Image (cartoon, grey):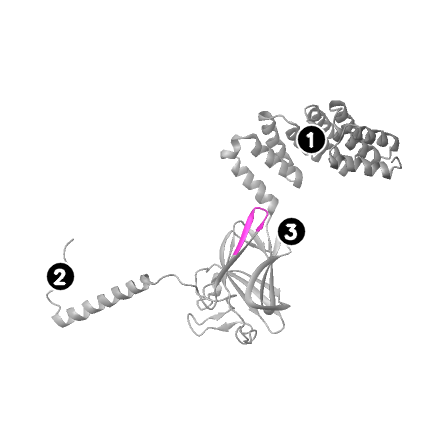
Amino acid sequence: MVPFTWPNQINSGMKKILSGSIMLVALTVTLVHAQVTTPRTPSPGASVSQTIGISKVTVTYSRPSVKGREVWGALVPYGWNKQGFGFGNDAPWRAGANENTTIEFSHDAKVEGKSVPAGTYGLFFVINKDNTGELILSKDNRSWGSFFYVAANDLLRAPITVRDHAMTEVLTYEFNNADKNSAELDLNWEKKQFPVKIEFAVDNIVIANATEELKGPTGFNWLGYSSAANYALQNKVNVDQGLKWIDIAIQQRKSFNTLRIKAGLLNLSNNKTEADKVMADATKIADENELNQYGYQLIAQEEKGKAVEIFVMMTQRYPESANAWDSLGEAYALNGDSKNAIKSFKKSLSLNPAANVKANSEKYLKQLGAM
């Protein structure tokens, strides 16, 4: 390394000033980087997440406390307000303390009914004296509070109604009222709650994700195609694609479950004749447990006569199974055939059944007046 030398035209006094300045900067940098990590007070950082379908929402924020202070209209002014520092623009409340409160969406979402692309956004609120309010999502997500807020960078503004709420000393975000496609994000502080509805097109996201996953290692195994097709069946979406996926699975593994999924998808596509043929093939290779589950599925679907047929088949294949006879008895009883129900339950009891099977057979026999 070439040693540093002062240019000749700089006098010795100037050299001393510059040298001192460089030393001061170096000392400052050293001091900054020499500090150890300590807890942040008085508004510690926090984060809260919620999974909706396969999508994730995460709020990262700092948590101020009330500490006996008047919050609404004082500590947090009503409406839009000019900050005493920064750009001096009219600004909303930072919805927390310290840096921007941020909200991150793993997939495209809807917030208060408005489309929001996947990404991370600054989260702000406005509260008015009459409990009307406004939610703001800003493309600025690395600022300090709302001192540098710029309205032109807003992605979304949506009106909300602020609710009265039980006293919450420390500002808290939480998710409530979650269902398949949505959840409510609530900010609770002092005696107010700021609700925000967040939604995802879960079925579309899952199907799109499955399509991509099946292009990778998941696509080398029948289970991937079977699970994707089963999602299409259970949620009654993308039936045509589901049929393509299950056909690939069946090519690799023809089983009761893969055939059952195909039959279900064929029913959804109004091809009952073909569905019945596929299901008949499935029952031919089903084991006792699979037949038992299928029989009870038929009962749940109010197809009790068909359930009886399946349980009869099960007792023919597994005549020494107490559970098979108990299940057949239950199907007969639910189908109103007391005579055959009693006969089946007594057969079950004669085969030294497990405690739970014995209890079920005895319960039904008592109900049928046969014990």
Pointer 2 local density, CA inside 10 Å: few below 14, some 14–19, many at least 20? few
Q: At numbered mark 2, what does the secondary structure look like: helix, strand or loop?
A: loop
Report the residue marked by disc 1.
289
**Magenta includes 55?**
yes
Amino acid at dot 2: Thr
User: What residue sits 77% from the left and 27% below the top?
Assistant: 351
Q: Earlier in the sequence, mark 3 or mark 2?
A: 2
Report the residue marked by disc 3.
179
Q: Earlier in the sequence, mark 2 or mark 1?
A: 2
Q: Is 371 on the left or on the right of 314, as rendered?
A: right
Q: Is 319 on the left or on the right of 141, as rendered?
A: right
User: What residue sits 36% from the left and 61% below the top?
Assistant: 36
Residue 205: x, y in percent? 57, 44
Residue 49 falls in image quadrant: bottom right
Amino acid at dot 3: Asp
**Does the CB distance between marks 3 and 2 fall below 8 Å?**
no
Q: 90 or 54: which is nearer to us?
A: 54
- Point out the stretch of residues depicted in magenta: 51-58
Q: Is 112 on the left or on the right of 10, as rendered?
A: right
Residue 135: x, y in percent? 56, 63
Report the residue marked by disc 2.
5
Residue 124: x, y in percent? 52, 64
Q: Earlier in the sequence, mark 1 or mark 3?
A: 3
User: What residue sits 60% from the left and 74% below the top?
Assistant: 129
Question: Image height check: is 346 above or below 94?
Answer: above
